[in-house]
Image (cartoon, rainbow, N blue to C red):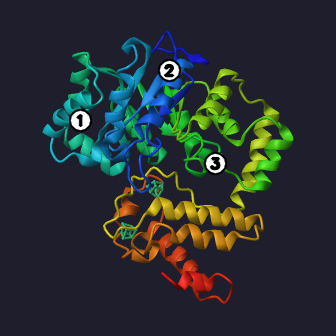
Amino acid sequence: MELRKNKNEPDGISLLGFGLMRLPLAAEGGQAVDRAKAREMVDYAVDHGINYFDTAWMYHDGDSERFAGEALSAHDRGKFFLASKMPLAFLKEPGDVERIFNEQLKKCKVEYFDFYLLHNIDREHFRIAESCNVYDQLKEKQKQGLIRHLGFSFHDRPDLLARVTSSYDWDFAQIQLNYLDWEQQNSKEQYEILYQKGIPVTVMEPVRGGALAKLPETALAIFKAADPHAGAASWALRFAASLPGVQTVLSGMTTLEQMKENISTMENFTALNDGEYQVIKEALVAYKSSGAVPCTACRYCMDCPSGVDIPRILAVYNNYLLNKSENHPMAGFLFDMEYKLPGPDKQAARCVDCGRCESLCPQHLKIPSYMKEIDSLYEERKSAPGPHSDFLKKE
Ligand code: SF4
Ligand code: SF4
């Protein structure tokens, strides 16, 4: 595994980091982590040179930090870096910072965090951070040796990033960066702000919640023609890892197979050359033509008070759009089946347009509009004559 050496860690951080937000689940529909499968992944990661593990208060409804503590305490504390985050969205008063931080140390079974972040800074969360005096409180923890490196994760526009980085001193910053968001979500501008200020970058969502690993055939064919042996995810990881100043690229892996593939990319890492950047540009044009919703499956929008399973519905819709763009003969039927599966209580029709999810979505997706669109699609298909319409009417 390639190690990135910088002012934070002169001995090096593994180029691939393990994001503990999409771990295998104990049961469909829940958020509890499947201990046996996830433990196998952590052990495999450590054995294969991954030394950066990234959890957060909110991941898996709190179970990610608990799991991280259980799994990593079996390993030598000096051999891994653990990152967690202060959930700004949950702070009501300054005293919450101390309470949450202490609980995180306990859950993670550690005496200090190697990397600690103010989680998900956007305009509203930055206001909360300032009103609760979060930076100064965490800086004090750093002086006490409870935090080694202090940073933040970010989901907003570059002008706010410039303000945040000018207002305080940071050891690192975590931004969403991948070849789709490079221009679409201003990743390029964000990266340049950090690079110019000499702030090491931790990359999140390099594969955009898995979307860049599961491409339409047209985009995949472009990658395969350029390199028949490289998977789609490896192009996305290499795009992020090729940038100077990147200290690690986090991947929220769910299966051991994904981990093996990603480790193989980073073990034999080579930066992209000009011809390969051109290949990515061409594949991107093909990807965009599918019209997929840019949801990363982060689940920050959950829980919906009406019970809508937002990330799942968007994933089902994206599958449908991908299949349709490839003229898959079963595109509609597969949509019907997948959409119906969790039951009517979780479907888009339950959306009452309260707007809660939209205000929480770091991608600023117009979720209620998508729910309307997807519900209409489902209703249209239900009333359409055809072999599956009877089946659909039975619910
Ligand atoms: S807008 Fe709809 S989907 Fe979003 S939280 Fe409200 S009810 Fe749920
Ligand atoms: S809709 Fe937004 S908040 Fe919800 S899972 Fe997708 S990207 Fe995350």
- Single out the mark in the foreground, 3 or 2: 2
**For mark 1, what is the residue?**
134
Q: In this view of the protein, which residue sits in the foreground, 324 or 386?
A: 386
Mark 2 Cα shell of 10 Å, populated few (<14), some (14-19), many (≥20): some
Determine which of the numbered discs, if any, sits on residue 46 in the image.
2
Q: Quadrant of residue 130?
A: top left
> In terms of secondary structure, where does tag 1 sit?
helix
Name which residue type carries label 1.
Val
Name which residue type carries label 2.
Val
The residues bearing labels 3 and 2 have C-alpha atoms spaced at a distance of 30 Å
Q: Quadrant of residue 151?
A: top left
Q: Are marks 3 and 2 in contact (CB under 8 Å)?
A: no
The quadrant of the rendering that contains the N terminus is top right
Mark 3 or mark 1: whose residue is earlier in sequence = 1
**For mark 3, what is the residue?**
180
Name which residue type carries label 3.
Leu
- The image shows residue 62, relative to residue 352, as above or below, that is above
Residue 155 at x, y = what percent? 44, 46
Q: Are marks 3 and 1 in contact (CB under 8 Å)?
A: no
Q: In this view of the protein, which residue sits in the foreground, 169 or 177?
A: 177
Q: Quadrant of residue 326?
A: bottom right
Query: Horizontal placement of 252 versus 118: left or right?
Result: right
The residues bearing labels 3 and 1 have C-alpha atoms spaced at a distance of 32 Å
